[in-house]
Image (cartoon, helix red, strand yellow):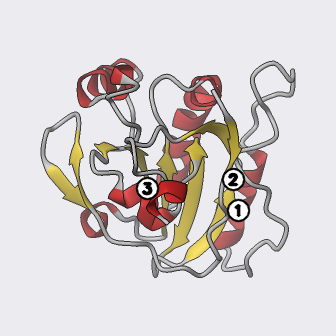
Amino acid sequence: MALTESYMLPLDTKAPAFSLQNVSSGSLETLDQLKGKSGTLIVFMCNHCPYVVHLIDAFIKSANEFSKNGINCIAISSNSIISHPQDGPEDMKKLALRKKFPFPYLYDESQEVAHAYKAACTPDFYLFDSDLKLYYRGRYDDSRPGNEKPLTGKDLHEACNAMIAKKQNIELQYPSMGCNIKWHQGNSPEERN
C-alpha cells in the first residue's frame, strides 16, 4: 500500500463525461443521468483500501445528507482486478448491497475515467457545482486509520455547504490521501507519458 495524495485537479475544470457499468444493476450509466440538481460529488474508491474502509460508513451518512440538498454522489472504482481481484464488479456489488450504498457504484474497467479526472488515490473526492464545474477536490477530513482523530467529514461538508450557499470556492483545500490507484500494467500516468 503506497500512501498517495490526490493530484488536485484545477478548480473550475469541467467534469469529464463518462458511461460506466453500475455494478448493482449491470446497466451503463452516464454522468448526465446521475448528476445532481445542485451538484455532483464523485469519489474514486475501492473495496480493499484501508483509507476507504476507515471512512465508508461516515461517508454513506454524508451522501444521504448531501442528497437532501440536491447533491448526488457517484462512486467509481478504477483499480486493476488483475492485481486486486477483490475490487472487481462482483465484490463491488456485494459491498454496495451489504452497506446499502445510497449512490451508484460504477466500474471503470479501462481506467480511462480515472485518467480523465487525474484520480490518484482512494478515496479521491471531486465536488462539482450544478454546471459540472469543479468546486472542491481534496480530503473528507483529517482523520486517517490509526491517527485517533474523529471522522467528521468537516472539509467536504464545509465545501458542500459553501457551494449550496453560492459562495466562492474555498481557497485552502487539502489533498485527499490514501492508497494509490492500482493501474493495469503500462497504464499508470507515468507509464503513459
Placement of 186 over or under 60, stated as above or below: below
Count neighbours of disc 3 (C-alpha within 10 A) and say few if under 14, some if 14 to 19, many if 20 or more.
many
Asked if the residues shown at circle 1 and circle 2 are in contact, with their CB atoms under 8 angstroms apart, the answer is yes
| Residue 180 seen anywhere in this rendered image of the structure | yes
Q: Amino acid at mark 2?
A: Leu
Q: Which element carries disc 3, helix, strand or loop?
A: helix
The disc at residue 114 is 3
As measured in the structure, the alpha-carbon distance from the residue carrying label 3 to the one carrying label 2 is 20 Å
Count neighbours of disc 1 (C-alpha within 10 A) and say few if under 14, some if 14 to 19, many if 20 or more.
many
Q: Which residue is mark 1?
A: 159
Placement of 184 over or under 58, stated as above or below: below
Asked which quadrant contains residue 115, the reply is bottom left
Q: Amino acid at mark 1?
A: Ala
Quadrant showing the N terminus: top right
Placement of 105 over or under 163, stated as above or below: above
Asked if the residues shown at circle 3 and circle 2 are in contact, with their CB atoms under 8 angstroms apart, the answer is no
Name the spot of residue 2 as percent of width and height, x first.
66, 33
Give the mark, 1 or 3, whose residue is nearer the N terminus.
3
Q: Which residue is mark 2?
A: 156
Give the mark, 3 or 2, whose residue is nearer the N terminus.
3
As measured in the structure, the alpha-carbon distance from the residue carrying label 1 to the one carrying label 3 is 22 Å
* Residue at the image position 58 percent from the left and 53 percent from the top: 125
- Mark whose residue sits in front, 1 or 3: 3
Residue at the outermost left position? 27
From the viewer's perspective, is 104 left or right of 73?
A: left
From the viewer's perspective, is 66 left or right of 177?
A: left
Taking depth in this image into account, of 21 and 7 the one nearest to the observer is 7
- Mark whose residue sits in front, 3 or 2: 3
Taking depth in this image into account, of 80 and 44 the one nearest to the observer is 80
Taking depth in this image into account, of 46 and 160 the one nearest to the observer is 46
Q: Amino acid at mark 3?
A: Ala
